[in-house]
Image (cartoon, grey):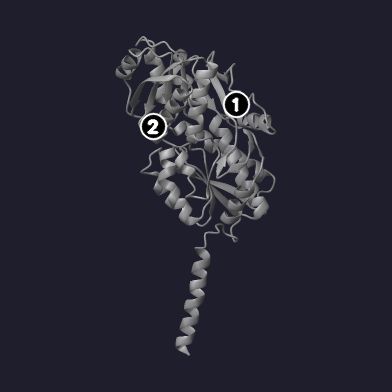
């Protein structure tokens, strides 16, 4: 009898253990629900992480004022990956292993998302990222969704813009030596040359390390380009713009959403006037809820929401709607993301095809010290 009783206890403990580790997420006994942000809060990309967290908190404030989800308040847990792919798995392991975390928004850097995605997938936790590397949604991580366009799509659009809209024929590329920059360089080159243009120079640099770009700019000037594509982030782009003039390289510059930040203007000043870049959001392009989001963000933070604030806000809204529709579980949120069609995002309607968002691209420009819609857009 003792042996039977012992086996019965073991069976009960096993069932409890399996239930706790089932990956459903959430805690029915808690008065709160949790989602997480995994983004750079320190380091060269901290500006983007800060804006994303602000936007997520705004979305949670709105739902909590209306009574929360299932009568529970929704809280945010913030993880700092520092923009480092060596740190990102540590953040992912913390979140994926915490049963109360229902979903994750992040990571911002593509290298971080690539380093962490397998951990989230093994735990069955849904993730919405704005990382752009095309490998992220290669089919191996069905719980991960991208709310931004891939680097390939951006690079091809920028090549078309340079050739067809701006009428340029000889391009130079200065790119950061990581997955993001290398992918952009390769895809831009392929598309630009397929249109009939020629990439006359390609030079690289190291994010967070390179400060003096005169060697690269001198080489580029020697090839006489009529446009320069900077495939990197706002810190280095500001430095490149400041050093291009003194190097005698006075050609238009274009970039990706990686420089879509007011910090570009703060760092680069007059030197970044006229730079054009890809983006997915601008307050002047209104969709249902855009005006209200912009006004609420300004009121709460006394700042203008940027590209990534809008995407993070939409990501949070998607997750919250998934909780409302299917219950506050990891599985319920994932099911909603699998099926959502034309969700009314402030950066435009959201649907996913093979876990990638379908959306259009904008071209923004620095004009008179502000980021505005470029006068010429892609058709």
Is residue 240 shown above or below 344? above
Q: Position of residue 299 (x, y in %)?
A: 63, 29
| SS at circle 1 | loop
Quadrant assignment for the C terminus: top right
Task: Tell me what residue is drawn at x 38 percent, y 39 percent.
Answer: 84
List the residue tagged with mark 2.
182
Q: Residue furthest bottom?
A: 1
**From the viewer's perspective, is 367 left or right of 221?**
right
Task: Tell me what residue is drawn at x 42 percent, y 47 percent.
Answer: 116
- Looking at the rendering, which quadrant does residue 3 occupy? bottom left
Q: Could you say which disc has been placed on residue 93 in the image?
A: none
Q: Which of 325/255 is in front?
A: 255
* Res. 38 in view: no
| SS at circle 2 | helix
List the residue tagged with mark 1.
282
Q: Residues within 10 Å of mark 1 (few under 14, many from 20)?
A: many
Q: Which of 24/181 is in front?
A: 181
Q: Which of 112/316 is in front?
A: 112
């Amino acid at each position: 009898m003792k042996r039977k009783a012992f086996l019965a206890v073991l069976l009960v403990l096993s069932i409890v253990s399996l239930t706790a580790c089932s990956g459903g997420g959430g805690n029915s006994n808690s008065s709160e629900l949790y989602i997480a942000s995994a983004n750079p809060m320190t380091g060269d990309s901290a500006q983007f992480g800060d804006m994303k967290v602000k936007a997520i908190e705004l979305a949670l404030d709105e739902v909590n004022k209306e009574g929360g989800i299932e009568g529970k308040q929704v809280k945010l847990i913030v993880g700092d990956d520092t923009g480092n792919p060596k740190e990102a798995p540590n953040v992912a392991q913390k979140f994926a292993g915490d049963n109360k975390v229902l979903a994750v928004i992040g990571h911002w850097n593509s290298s971080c998302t690539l380093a962490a995605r397998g951990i989230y997938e093994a735990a069955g936790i849904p993730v919405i990222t704005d990382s752009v590397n095309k490998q992220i949604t290669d089919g191996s991580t069905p719980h991960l969704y991208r709310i931004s366009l891939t680097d390939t799509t951006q690079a091809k659009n920028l090549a078309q813009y340079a050739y067809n809209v701006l009428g340029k024929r000889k391009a130079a590329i200065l790119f950061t030596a990581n997955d993001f920059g290398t992918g952009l360089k390769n895809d831009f080159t392929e598309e630009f040359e397929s249109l009939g243009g020629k990439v006359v120079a390609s030079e690289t640099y190291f994010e967070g390390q390179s400060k003096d770009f005169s060697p690269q700019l001198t080489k580029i000037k020697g090839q006489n380009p009529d446009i320069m594509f900077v495939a990197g982030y706002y810190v280095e782009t500001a430095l490149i713009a400041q050093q291009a003039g003194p190097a005698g390289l006075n050609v238009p510059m274009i970039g990706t959403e990686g420089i879509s930040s007011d910090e570009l203007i703060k760092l680069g000043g007059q030197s970044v006037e006229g730079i054009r870049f890809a983006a997915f959001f601008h307050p002047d392009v209104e969709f249902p809820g855009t005006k209200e989001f912009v006004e609420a963000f300004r009121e709460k933070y006394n700042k203008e929401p940027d590209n990534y604030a809008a995407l993070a806000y939409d990501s949070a809204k998607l997750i919250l709607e998934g909780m409302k529709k299917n219950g506050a579980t990891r599985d319920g949120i994932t099911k909603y993301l699998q099926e959502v069609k034309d969700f009314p995002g402030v950066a435009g309607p959201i649907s996913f095809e093979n876990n990638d968002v379908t959306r259009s691209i904008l071209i923004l420009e620095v004009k008179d010290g502000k980021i505005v819609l470029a006068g010429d857009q892609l058709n």
